[in-house]
Every structure is written in structure tokens, then in C-alpha cells.
Amino acid sequence: MSKSIDGTPLTDEFRMPGEFEPHKQTWMLWPQRPDNWRLGAKPAQRSWVEVATAISQFEPVVVGVDHDQFDNARHRLPQHIRVVELSSNDAWMRDCGPSFVVNDEGELRLVDWDFNGWGGLHDGLEFPWDRDDAVPRKVAEIESVDRYKAPLVMEGGSFHVDGEGTLLTTEECLLSPGRNPDLSKGEIEQHLKDYLNVEKVIWLARGIDPEETNGHIDDVACFVRPGVLAFAWSDDRDHPYYDIQAENLAILLRQTDARGRALEVSKVPLPAPVVRTAEEADDVDHVEGTIPRQAGDALPASYINFYICNGGVVKPSFDDPMDEPARDAIQRLFPDRRVACVAGREILLGGGNVHCITQHQPRRSYR
């Protein structure tokens, strides 16, 4: 049984752990919509199986599927991966799913953000988004976890926390007019502090995917541990993301975290620019209400869109010369975890990558 809770995680002394802290399990959603995934989503489904299987080496995985895809998903996924009926509009569990919070007594709750398809009717990617918006409530019922309803339109890919009071996000995303146009930057920041129990919000300027998510942070930088960030970078001044990341790097190097530590920024190389081919665009159904996929679309390829799990890191690869240098850089940042590489292009064609399709449920915390 799950109930909605008055108050906030801040007042109740719950916090969101860092992704690098221990997990109970990982949540995913099954892809199926042919207006976002090419060839009836079959190539994407194979990628989801690869990602879920890689994660399951390290921790349990739960995949939510629509009723008409249950048998197909159950057949394709390994038997040790749990499949539950959980309808959605698309497969981006990081963005439409809940954020989990814990307290020092080992209690677990979740935060239910408003979700409006990455910008609503202003510049959103799809319509409708009602089933995505209901995902956190359904997860709360499945797990018998109480939930907080946050008065903020936000996606999980738009922020990272260090578990010790610091949150990282971008102005481009959280201040975009399609999300919370009636809220000031200060009001948005206060909601973040109230519902994630953070003390300091570090605002970067822009992300690398303005057309898809209005600049989610999870392609740009993430916390490896408190005080240490992995950061997407190219030394090539002609790389399309060079100016964006140079601006973001300058901001980070001037910042301290909530504990007063200067941030250690470790660079992870960016792959070469990736664009959608004419064949890949033609393989996607054109449906009113969904942003069309077109040949030549720039795709936000970044190795930073990895997922940290118990004892491992699951990282996308793009058949690029930087695949191995990026793997090595990530391995150095996580010496006690094994880096598993999965093919990232099919996920990227839908607008994100490994981090975007996963959501971590923390292990109940005792301090």
C-alpha cells in the first residue's frame, strides 16, 4: 500500500542518495512506439535487452511494459529480469520515473515530479504524456512506497545529486518556458532544496541537446562521488559542443559544493558528432503530435550518459575511435567497479542513452 505524504523530504529529513550509493534495483520501461523507434521498435528492443542484461550482472532489474507488449518483452528478456505491466507513453524511465529518497532509519519514499513530455505544448516532443506522468504513482504502488507530490515540472535526466547536499543542473532546461514558466529561478531552486533535501544548486549554462530535452545535465557532467565530476570534453575547438562545454567547465572550476570543497573535474572524451541517416529517419513512422525524425538530425552522443550500478558502470559505445579512451577514462574514475560497454546508437536515435532509460532505486539506508 502506498500513500501520498504531506510535507517535504527536507522537513521529514529524507535525502536523495547519489547514484553511486548502493541500489536495491534498477527500473526500465520497454520501447514500442513506432513514431520514435525505427522499424517498429525492434532494434531498440534489442538494445534494451542488451542494457538490461548488462545491468543485471550487478543488480536486479525491473522492466515495465504495456499490456500488449508483455509477452514479447518476457520472451526477449532473460528470465532473471523481472517484467511487470506498467503502461507508459515511451521508454524514458529516468525522465518520467520517480526520484527515490531515504532517511537514516532505513525508510524509503519517492518524489513524484510533474512530467509534460519535455516541454508540454510549448516545445515538447510528444503528445499525450498522461501515462508517463502516472509512472511514479504506479511504481509507488508496486513497491508499497509512500510518495511526495512535487509542484514542479522536471525530468530525472535534468539533474544529478552528490548525496551530500549538492545538485547539478542547467539553466537551459529548468528555466525553459515549456516547464515552469510561472516560477522564478529562485522558486525553482527552493523546490529542489525542499524535495531533494539539497543545500546548494550549481547551475550550468547549457546542455548539448537543446532540441530534445532543452539541455539535460546527464549528457554533460555527473557526480562520480562527492566532490568529483566526470565531464564530457573535446580538445577540438571545431567540435559542435566545444563552446558549450568550455562555458560549463569555467563555471564548475569557480564552484564549491555544499561542503565547501572545490570540485575536481575529470574529462571524458566526446565522440565525433553523430547525425541521423536518411534510412534511419525513413524507418520511423510519422504521427501527428510527435516531433518528426529527419535525416541530418544532430544526435547528442556523449559517454557521460552512463549508468552507475552496484559494482559496475554501463556505458554506451558509438563505433567511434573514442570508445576505448572513454572507457579507460571512466574505468579510472571507478577503480572498484567494472565498466560494461553496450551499443548506444539505437538508444541515441530516440533522443538519449543508457542513463536516460534507467532509474535507480536505492537500497534502504542506515547511517
Image: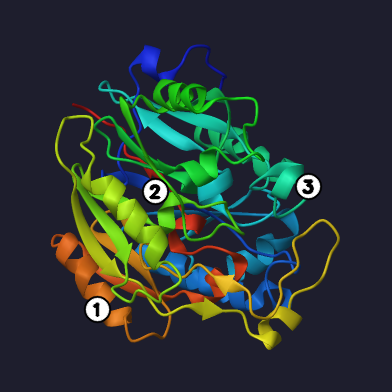
State which tag comes first along the sequence, 3 or 1. Answer: 3
Q: Which mark is drawn over residue 289?
A: none
State which tag comes first along the sequence, 1 or 2. Answer: 2
Residue 328's image quarter? bottom left
* Colour style of the rendered protein structure: rainbow
Residue at horizontal 15%, vertical 66%? 332
Picture layout, residue 41 above or below residue 267: below
Q: CA distance from mark 2 to mark 3?
A: 29 Å
Q: What percent of the width, then of the height, locates residue 66?
A: 70, 54
Q: Amino acid at mark 1?
A: Pro
Residue 71's image quarter? bottom right
Q: What percent of the width, then of the height, locates residue 292?
A: 76, 67
Residue at horizontal 58%, vertical 37%? 136
Picture layout, residue 227 above or below residue 290: above
Quarter of the image that includes the N terminus? top right
Most foreground residue, 358 or 323: 323
Query: Dot 2, crowdedness within 10 Å: few (<14), some or many (≥20)?
Result: some
Q: Specify whether 255 is left or right of 122.
A: left
Q: Which residue is mark 2?
A: 25
Q: Which residue is mark 3?
A: 128
- Of discs 2 and 3, which sits in the foreground? 3
Total marks placed: 3
Q: What percent of the width, then of the height, locates residue 183?
A: 59, 25
Q: Amino acid at mark 3?
A: Pro
Q: Which residue is mark 1?
A: 325
Q: Amino acid at mark 2?
A: Gln
Helix, strand or loop at mark 2: strand
Q: Specify whether 76 is left or right of 331.
A: right
Helix, strand or loop at mark 1: helix
Residue 244 appears in the picture as rendered:
yes
